[in-house]
Amino acid sequence: MLSAPQPGSLILRTALTDLKLKKRSRPLLAYTPAGLVAYGAVQALSAITTRVQLASTILEFEVLESGAELVLAEAEGSLGVPGTASSAASWDQLTDRSRVFGARMARMLDNSRRPLDQQVDCTAITTP
């Protein structure tokens, strides 16, 4: 972690934009007094990924050279289609897409050190 730009350092920016979440429905027993207490306790202890469904989002990555703010690599992709339940995104899809983008970023940076005729197609990476 750097407090000021340093020569030879990189800045990695990631963002989830246009994020749409959908709250999961409650089970029928959660509407009884005892069920409400139990349901509340379970919800408080569970991770956000089990409490909320990911409907859609746009995932963005950017790698910058620290000193000059020069963009070395960037990627953007969308998950899910807003407003349609049948094509909703999942947290696992988000994790997989993040890994694919990470692998593509690493390949782009490797390509920057290679001659043009030895560079590898970054878009060929489709699985984590």
Image (spheres, rainbow, N blue to C red):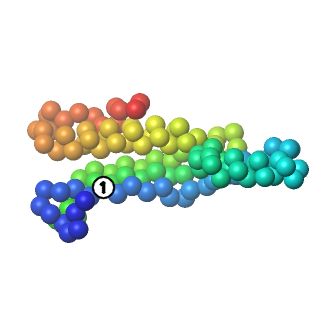
User: In the depicted view, which residue is nearer to us: 85 or 42?
Assistant: 42
User: In the depicted view, which residue is nearer to us: 63 or 5?
Assistant: 5
Q: Indicate the quadrant where residue 88 lies.
A: top right
Q: Which quadrant is the N terminus positioned in? A: bottom left
- Residue 3 screen position, x and y as percent: 23, 68
Total numbered circles = 1
Name the amino acid, label 1.
Leu
Residue drawn where x is 69% and y is 47% of the image: 42
Q: Which quadrant is the C terminus positioned in? A: top left
> What residue is pinned by disc 1?
12
- Residue 14 screen position, x and y as percent: 39, 55
Q: Which residue of the protein is positioned furthest toward the right in this rendering?
A: 32
User: In the depicted view, which residue is nearer to us: 77 or 53?
Assistant: 53
User: In the depicted view, which residue is nearer to us: 39 or 126?
Assistant: 39
Residue drawn where x is 77% and y is 48% of the image: 38
- Residue 93 screen position, x and y as percent: 52, 38
**Circle 1: element type:** strand
Q: Alpha-carbon neighbours of circle 1 within 10 Å: few (<14), some, or many (≥20)?
A: some
Q: Is residue 85 left or right of residue 16?
A: right
Residue drawn where x is 15% and y is 32% of the image: 118
Is any part of residue 1 visible from this angle? yes
Q: Is residue 51 left or right of residue 67?
A: right
Is any part of residue 54 visible from this angle? no
Q: Is residue 118 left or right of residue 79?
A: left
- Residue 113 screen position, x and y as percent: 13, 42
